[in-house]
Amino acid sequence: MSKNNPFKQSRRSFLSGSVVVGVGAMASGSVRAQTADPLITEPQEWVQSFGDGVDATPYGLPIKYEGGVVRRNVEWLTADQVSSINFTPIHALDGTITPQGCAFERHHSGAIDLSKKNYRLMINGLVDTPLVFTYEDLERFPRENHIYFCECAANTGMEWAGAQLNGVQFTHGMIHNMEYTGVPLRLLLEEAGYDTTGKWVFVEGADASSNGRSIPMDKALDDVLVAFKANGEALRKEHGYPVRLVVPGWEGNMWVKWIRRIEVTNSPVESREETSKYTDTLSDGVSRKWTWAMDAKSVVTSPSPQAPIRHGSGPLVVTGLAWSGHGRITRVDVSKDGGKTWETARLAKPGERMALTRFYLDINWDGSEMLLQSRAMDENGYVQPTKTQLRDVRGLNSIYHNNCIQTWWVRENGEAENVEVS
């Protein structure tokens, strides 16, 4: 081996360390090479008969051994199942792309059954020519593909008052990251001849709740998509099939599903979903009127309460996700002692605008307790705050836009728990 190749040297050291762990601590899960393993030495059933045929599962599904990687909800969190939330199992995923079948869902009156044939999208208000588009009409416009995260404004909301939910799926799982295909909203507005004096658009969904949000025209003309595909396939029913809005970097409630109408206006409509909720209450009781963008945030997904350490001491990969609604993630630090000291993690690839970034920190765990935290920084120099810093400004009455640093207490046995540190 060349002495000039530090990667090979470090890899050899890493593997050597694994062997030592395997010989000295069988509880780690490593097995000594000289031990006869029947899974290696004896023929197994899967090599003695044919497997499933190619037509057994016309639409591919995860193997049964991954049956626990599913969305979950919290029964007491919302009033009813038709106005509820399912959380992404981010503790069990890697990379950044969220499979549609695992991607969190939030709706206010249930996921509706709307076919492409019956789909219509109206553009009206301050336009030269009010227009109605069919699904086929939308497909004729030039389309784009972009990877964006969608995060509910209430993600981590239950943690304002203390460590409430024990699992990263529940504390941070109101988020997904998918590749969306669609038509820039700008092109549709131009087709209708929008009045340049119009400063806002109001977008409305076709479901019974008629969820609607006002969006500044500058944002609408910038990067908003009218999307009909996610991760290469049609949107799922619960994600707004056949057409939804994508508002990069901004809170998920503005990503209106089953979008049926876009009205150009001179002022915000101030609908139910932008007045009665989705506003941030400060410590003095005053609520901010507009808080659209999702600030930089991160979380360690493993180890975590739903992803404990099972292999004992030795080499350990600490991993998680970071994101910012203001641009790209440029750095993530990880602390093993509750924020006293920090190490810079390795980004799986350079951060992308308004998309999740995967980070890794490869450590040698000695089996002692850890207080794991991560801290994200974006391209604007913004640094993810502690919960104390947020509370100093907003008190304890907030629900939305909680982007605080999260702490997992990892015990000597590898189990983890949601805690706060002061």
Image (cartoon, rainbow, N blue to C red):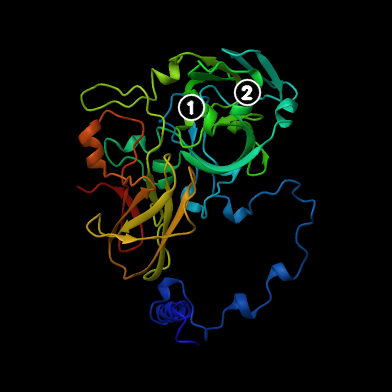
In the picture provided, is 223 more to the left or to the right than 321?
right
Residue placed under numbered mark 2 in the picture = 190
User: Residue 285: which quarter of the image?
Assistant: top left
- For residue 218, the mark is 1
In the image, residue 344 lies at what x, y percent?
A: 34, 60
User: Residue 28: which quarter of the image?
Assistant: bottom left
Instruction: Judge whether residue 236 can be spotted in this image.
Output: no
The reply to whether dot 2 and dot 1 touch (C-beta < 8 Å) is no
Residue drawn at 36 percent across, 41 percent down: 165
Question: Within 10 Å of the Cα at label 2, are there few (<14), some (14-19), or many (20+) other Cα atoms?
Answer: few
Q: Earlier in the sequence, mark 2 or mark 1?
A: 2
In the image, residue 378 lies at what x, y percent?
A: 38, 47
Question: Within 10 Å of the Cα at label 1, are there few (<14), some (14-19), or many (20+) other Cα atoms?
Answer: few
Amino acid at the residue labelled 2: Glu
Tell me the CA gap for discs 2 and 1.
Answer: 14 Å
Which is nearer the eye, 387 or 24?
387
Please tell me whether mark 2 sits on a helix, a strand or a loop: helix
- For residue 145, the mark is none
Please tell me whether mark 1 sits on a helix, a strand or a loop: helix
Residue drawn at 36 percent across, 31 percent down: 400
In the image, residue 177 lies at what x, y percent?
A: 53, 44
